[in-house]
Image (tube, grey):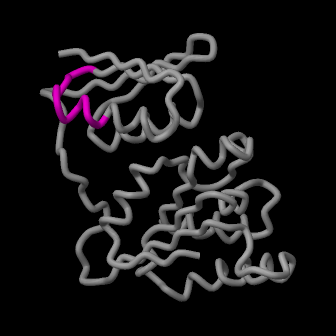
Amino acid sequence: MKKELDCRGLACPAPVLQTKDAIETDHPDIIKVTVDNEASKQNVNRFLESQGFEVSVEQEGAEFHVIGKIEGGAVPDEPVAEKPETGQEKIMVMVANDCMGHGDDELGSKLMVSFLKTLKEMGDELWRLVFVNNGVKLTTEDAEVLPVLKEYEERGLQILVCGTCLTHFNLLDEKQVGETTNMLDIVTAIQLADKVINI
């Protein structure tokens, strides 16, 4: 069965939520989702891959057709923890600003850099690092903390960066680390985490 969705003009995470609903309701072998922005394209692509689909993308002008194919219908409705059960806590850190605290922004920027550098002391319990709102600026090419974040990513830490936030600040093309994500991924990560720390 083939399913087609027209998600043009929809803000994140609506395209992913509509895709999720279509998969859970109709169990298509092929799904084609049309979107009109880069963040939605990346988010739908990643979601389909997470559900076991082979994904291809066709561009037509300013529109993207994200096409997912799967053998025998769609797979699980329930999110599956990507980290094996080790008895260790899974800690998610959500960073919503590019500086820490209120008052002096210069001091706040230094504190944030120091905080992100020191996160490695959590060891393997640091499970996800999520950047939203002003925090997405820390993932761009001019950010002082970028080398630290790249090192975390190379060690296997999953870094998620809000696509809606990147688009809002016109920074989608300047992101240098992490996966562009959406609110569905963030909410799912909160559900799977043992502890969430908000900064």
Which residue is farthest front? 103
| Residue at the image position 83 percent from the left and 76 percent from the top | 105
Which residue is farthest left? 72
Relative horizontal placement of residue 195, taking residue 158 as reference (left or right): left
97 up-or-down from 36: above or below = below
Residue 193 in magenta stretch? no
Relative horizontal placement of residue 41, taking residue 141 as reference (left or right): left
Dividing the picture into quadrants, the one containing residue 69 is top left
69 up-or-down from 161: above or below = above
Dividing the picture into quadrants, the one containing residue 52 is top left
Question: Which quarter of the rendered picture does the N terminus lie within?
Answer: top left
Where is residue 31? Give x, y as percent.
30, 22
133 up-or-down from 94: above or below = above
Relative horizontal placement of residue 131, taking residue 142 as reference (left or right): left
Residue 28 in magenta stretch? yes
| Residue at the image position 34 percent from the left and 57 percent from the top | 188
| Residue at the image position 34 percent from the left and 32 percent from the top | 18
The residue range painted magenta reads 20-30
- Number of dots carrying numbers: 0
33 up-or-down from 94: above or below = above
- Toward the viewer: 186 or 139? 186
Dividing the picture into quadrants, the one containing residue 167 is top right
Where is residue 198? Give x, y as percent.
53, 75
Question: Which quarter of the rendered picture does the C terminus lie within?
Answer: bottom right
Where is residue 20? Give x, y as percent.
29, 37
Relative horizontal placement of residue 44, taking residue 83 as reference (left or right): right
Where is residue 74? Give x, y as percent.
19, 33
| Residue at the image position 59 percent from the left and 32 percent from the top | 38
What's the magenta bit mostly, secondary-structure-wise? Answer: helix
